[in-house]
Image (cartoon, helix red, strand yellow):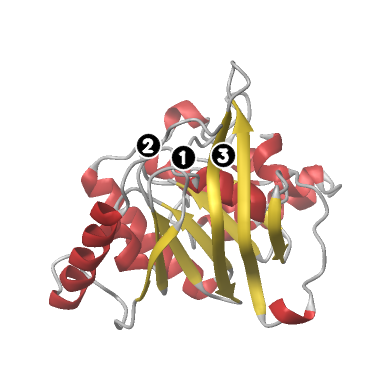
Amino acid sequence: MATELKARAQPSLPGSARGKAVSLERVERTYRDRDGRALRALDGVSVHAAHGDLLAVVGPSGCGKSTLLELICGLQAPDRGSVACAPAVLMPQRDLLLPWLDAVDNAALALRIAGRPRSEARSRAAELFRDLGLDGFEEARPAELSGGMRQRVAFLRTLLSGKPVLCLDEPFGALDAITRGEMQAWLSHTLAREPRTVVLVTHDVEEAIVLADRVVVLSARPGRVIEELEVDIARPRARTQAAVLRLRERALAALQLGAPSGEALA
């Protein structure tokens, strides 16, 4: 829960990054394995998102996508390069709902942590339940909710943090195909009503193209930007649209070019 709701204070945007909600320039991030060997997660990554953009990031497992989100949220610092972002909040793949709280209290948790009284926080969260397709489930416990409903509650909790940048780490990865499609449509509708800058990490290339304004393709570890795709397709989009399929093929071709590395650095 701390991952989603608390992050270090982030610097104001420098002159070169003004007009952007997210700006990473030539970022490198390296970890140490159990034997003390250096494993580079990101290598010279530059990523930008304007205010109100939905930026999708795709790439193979282990390429540094989650690390990228944590850098944006101020939960990690780069070894080299610069990170300048508007205040951001991270929604991890798991919903992390507290089983002893009902749906409204779970959604209102960000407001409670910010110091709002419980009655005020519950009232604010309940106002949005109908808009998010949760009307009538305010007092349900997480175990009584479907997977899609749980993700909506988790997203509402993230939204109520008030942060202008939302970092979503595979938010629909654990859902079945039908529910996932419904949630993609729901997310587009919700962001139209409650605009935010969004950085979405996903393994699903089609999902990225259906949802995003721009798609960044990372190589295998160490992650490098190997392609950026502008998605100039009117919404709503369908996976079967010719334009979507063309961009899908370009993204998949880029992923194939990102030769795997993964070896330890000397």
> Image quadrant of residue 60?
top left
Q: At 25% across and 40% down in the image, what residue appears?
A: 176
Calculate the distance from the C-alpha at mark 1 to the C-alpha at mark 2. 6 Å
Q: At 42% across and 43% down in the image, what residue appears?
A: 149
Question: Which residue lies under the disc numbered 1?
Answer: 150
Question: Which residue lies under the disc numbered 2?
Answer: 146
- Residue 75 image offset from top left, x and y in percent: 71, 44
Say which mark, if any, is on residue 162: none
- Answer above or below: position of 224 versus 53: above
**Left or right of 241 on screen, residue 205:** right
Q: What amino acid is found at the position of numbered circle 2 in the picture? A: Ser
**Left or right of 43 on screen, residue 218:** left
Calculate the distance from the C-alpha at mark 3 to the C-alpha at mark 2. 12 Å
Residue at the front extreme of this rendering: 266
Q: At 68% across and 52% down in the image, what residue appears?
A: 73
- Residue 200 image offset from top left, x and y in percent: 47, 57
